[in-house]
Structures are given as C-alpha cells and as structure tokens.
Image (spheres, rainbow, N blue to C red):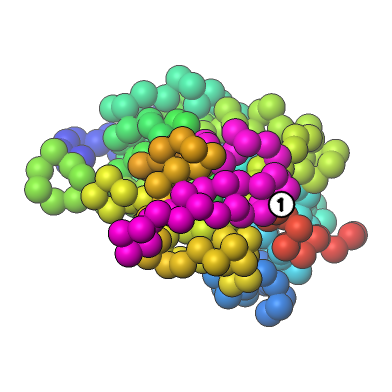
Amino acid sequence: MPENADLLPKLEDFDFNLKHALGAVVALRSHIPDDAFTASILGDDRAGNGILINDSGLVLTIGYLITEAETIWITGNDGQAVAGCVQGYDQETGFGLIQALGPLDLPHLELGESASVREGDRVVFAGHGGAQGAVVVEVIGVREFAGYWEYLLDEAVFTAPAHPNWGGGAVIDRNGRLVAVGSLFVQQSGAGAQPVDGNMAVPIDLLKPILNDLLSRGCANRQPRPWLGLFGTEIEDRLVVAALSDDGPAEQAEVSVGDIVVKVAGQPVETLADFFRRVWSLGPAGVDVPITINRDGENFEMTIESIDRNSLLKTPRLH
C-alpha cells in the first residue's frame, strides 16, 4: 500500500454525487464457447464490471471479459439483470463495449480526461455494489506497461491499494468523471523492501479516438498489428521466450521456449516494449518478421509469418 494509505480520504470526502457515479458501475457475466480460442486462456465463464457511459445502455468494460462472448448479462445495483451483446472490441487498447438489449434505469458516467491524472492523485476505484464495492486509492504511477501477450500502453494508470474486483472497474476522478478502466492486479516495487499490491488501469483518453469506430464498425478503423503468438519475459536484461501459442506463428517458425530474442529485423531488443515496437514498425498483420534468437549460446536467424490475432477469435452473434 502507499506509505500514506492511512491518510487517504474516505468516499464521503469526494464532493461529486457519489450515489450517481457508483450507480453507473454494473456487474458483468459472460459465457464463452468451449471451442473459442481464448477459452483455455481466460476461461469460458468470466465475471467483472462494466461502466454505463450513456443513457442508451452502452457499457464500457475491459475487453478480456467479453472476448468471444456467446452470452452476456448486465446487473445493476438495483438487482435488475438484462442481456447484452458485444458492440465492439479493440485489441490495441483492451477496451470492450457492450450494448444492453433491454432498458437499464441507471445513471451513466461522463468521460473525463486521463491526461490530467497525476501521480499522487486520490481517486475512487469502483466495482459493482455501490459504496461497498468502491475503494479510495492513490495514483502511484502513470507510465509504460508491456504485457507478455503482445500488448503495450504508453501511459497506463497504476493505483494502490489493490481493488479486489478490478476487472472493468471504474477509476473516477474528483470531478466524478471516468478517467480509466481497471484491467489487472499488479505487484510493484515500492519505497520499502515489500512490493506494493495495486492495479493497472487503461486510460480513458485511448477510447475517445476510436469510440465512433467501435460503435459503427465493431473495431477501430486501422490496420491490425502483426501477431506472433510469442510470450516473452525479461530476465537479467534479456528477452526470453516464456511460452508459445499452440500452432501460432512463432511455434510454426520453430521458435522454442527458452530461446533468447536478440534482434528484430537486425535491430537489438532487450525489453518487451522494444520487441513489440520493432515488430509493429515492420508493417500490419501478415508482414514477415525476421528475428535473431540465441539458443544454447548459438545465434539463429529465422522469419515468422505474422497474422491478425482477430482472425482466430469467434465473432459476436448478430442480434
């Protein structure tokens, strides 16, 4: 926890309409078919939160809760449950949108500006359940985040203490506006010897340029990034292959777990972020990615034929 966690303000110290803001956070449950690509990774029954962002039943959440969802149920603090359908999903940001298929007599949250969020700010991290599902937290960092599943944010929002139900939760600023959406539980090095338990949240400013595309197309209007199915980890300033997606591009190219990635297209890489940026700079999905790997002390050159990861996912049912 932050050093001054005991001094964090309480919910009642925030001067916006707390009942209104927390009422916009709903519970989500989704079911994914057993044969879906992400079922073995993320499970076929998923639960978390969503945030109502307009008065027409549009719910914003973190995308892994609804990727390849066959059915979705939305439940408000009043206990009312309605079905929903996937409206849109964006791999790059991780945001997902759901359209409620029935009326939701609930308030909605206005979008704020995550660019205004600073380290040291006190914010509310809200899950479903009203005040009982909300925690006052401190922003302990706004910085780069690289996820091994080929995911990168330039300025993720990190908060502490950790919220117990972080997925799709609302990070709300002092003006009662939504500034980020909860994504992960993380442990980070703190000022002392003990790691700090907290959360990583996706900044809301990343949604604004693609919101209309998600509503009209179901995805962002940009070329998909190349995907390799290579899960890397940083060990002593080296980028090591920790796992491979079954029958994915990297496995088909005969990359092996334990290989050290030395270069991409002749350029050295040491971190996950370096690796992703080098790969993505080569072109859209489908581009050949030349890499140099070190295996048992010997360097090897190989080429991975990238694909669009979305091509592996089940598309939402039409309603």
Question: Residue at left 76%, top 43%?
Answer: 219
Give the residue at the far bottom of this rendering.
Answer: 34
Q: Is residue 280 magenta?
A: yes
Q: Which residues are magenta?
A: 277-306
- Residue 180 placed where, x, y %? 51, 37
Residue 75 image-quadrant placement: bottom right
Question: Residue at left 77%, top 65%?
Answer: 314
5 and 90: which one is in front? 90
Q: Which residue is mark 1?
A: 308
Asked if residue 65 shows in the view, the reply is no
Q: Secondary structure at mark 1?
A: loop
Asked if residue 295 shows in the view, the reply is yes
| Placement of 258 over or under 119, stated as above or below | below
Give the residue at the far right of this rendering.
Answer: 319
Residue 215 image-quadrant placement: top right
Question: Residue at left 51%, top 63%?
Answer: 255
| Placement of 149 over or under 59, stated as above or below | below
Q: How many marks?
A: 1
| Placement of 205 over or under 116, stated as above or below | below
Residue 48 in the figure: left or right of residue 59: left
- Residue 257 placed where, x, y %? 42, 67
